[in-house]
Image (cartoon, rainbow, N blue to C red):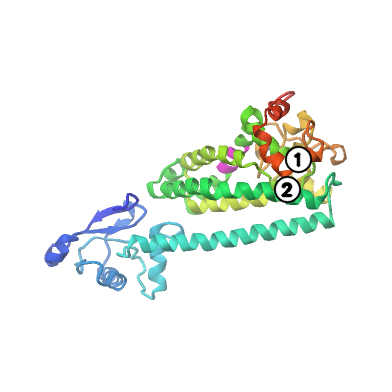
Amino acid sequence: MRADLLPISISYPAQRTADAEKTNRTKFSISSAREVKETGERGVQQWYTASLTKNAGETNATKPTRSSPVPEHAGRVCRPGSNLRHQCRYIRRGGIAAAGVAATVIRPRTCESANSMDAKRSGRLGTAGMVASFGLLLWMEHRRSLRNPVESKERRVARNLGVAGVSAVLLHFAERPVSVPLAKLVERRRLGLLQRLSLPAWLETLWATLMLDYTMYLWHVLEHRVPVLWRFHAVHHADLDLDASTALRFHFGELAASIPWRAAQIVVIGVTPRTLAIYQRLLMLSVLFHHSNVRISTRTERWLSRIIMTPRLHGIHHSVEHNEVNSNWSSGLTIWDTIHQTLKPGASIDNVTIGLADYRDPDELTLPKVLKMPFERSTAKRVTQRPGKGNS
Ligand SMILES: [Zn+2]
């Protein structure tokens, strides 16, 4: 039996057959034993019909009696993401008006497959959305650029996409196999702070997103404070210009180092797969936007920067000046910089030089050199702890 299933014994003494004796435990994939309670005859009959339809030849469950306990979810909102929720949807789609009946004997594998299909479909849509957002920002950068470029745009974008390609492989084979199963485990076992509070779904998602955003701020600070992390993060900061492609320029070593942090975020906060997916998309949109070289009117940007990180604000974080790079760390909401008094809105964009002071030659920033950069001894001496000096 899969460890993630909650077994519930249901027996029907009056009609138990020899075969049924062998399978007197019917397994329900439900999110909580609290969702199990009595239903009336109609619900039981519909449950039984659905069971036989879905599992013809696969189960020996016998017809329950009026008093048989049947899991149900009357009055509860089906939320996507859990096995129970998908079972609910299947019942509705199948035309069985089983309002209140969530417990079917649909094999857990069926629900897992459905979850997987939904996740894949959602993932493809999310990827398409990100590609479209990236393209839109590149077009807007062309039409309304905020800073004058130092390097050729084509050369930089190609290099940054090269760094992103290597990192994408690591994300696919190392990060996702950790974060997604962990989030599923959190949902099944109700692990983490928010899972213990039993909040409404929307409120749980909101709190989780806020807490993920705050802990992302802390991670970014650590990347600047801890020398070994800074060596990898410096690859991102070494870009001589700042645009939407810089948002994808994270060294694979930096992403690998962030996996334990992401795992801790999921388990401690109690992040479900759905919330994780929502947060990751919001984060990606935010990161693309505030790295972009899109000129927004000063008035609009001043208003926006009270809520979210903006291109001008984040440009200051990419400055060669140490007192500027140690500011504006937020990845989403600027409230975290405000609380920690690290928000630096004042610098004029004309006075900001993007990049690292010790890496001004584009020939030192080719794709192979950028990928090797964190591992070079000379690099370590040049970048280690530089941002930590003169901290605000
Ligand atoms: Zn940074």
Residue 45 relative to residue 281: left or right: left
Residue 94 appears at what percent x and percent y?
39, 74
Viewer-nearest residue: 315 or 338: 315
Some atom of ligand 1 lies within 8 Å of the CB belonging to the residue at label 1: no
Secondary structure under the numbered disc 2 in the rendered image: helix
Residue underneath mark 1: 365
Assign a secondary structure to mark 1. helix
Most common secondary structure along the magenta stretch: helix
Q: Earlier in the sequence, mark 2 or mark 1?
A: 2
Where the C terminus falls, by quadrant?
A: top right
Q: Nearer the viewer, residue 189 or 355?
A: 355
Amino acid at pointer 2? Arg
Tell whether position 213 is magenta: yes
The picture places residue 278, in percent across and down from the top left corner, at 56, 53
Amino acid on which disc 1 is placed: Leu
Q: Residue at x 15, y 65 (%)?
A: 19
Q: Which residues are magenta?
A: 211-217
Q: Residues within 10 Å of mark 1 (few under 14, many from 20)?
A: some
Q: Is residue 72 above or below residue 366?
A: below
Q: What residue is disc 2 on?
A: 159
Residue 88 appears at what percent x and percent y? 39, 65
- In contact (CB < 8 Å): disc 2 and disc 1: yes
Q: In the orientation shown, which residue stands out farthest toward the top?
A: 390
**Residue 135 occupies quadrant:** bottom right
67 lies above or below 247: below
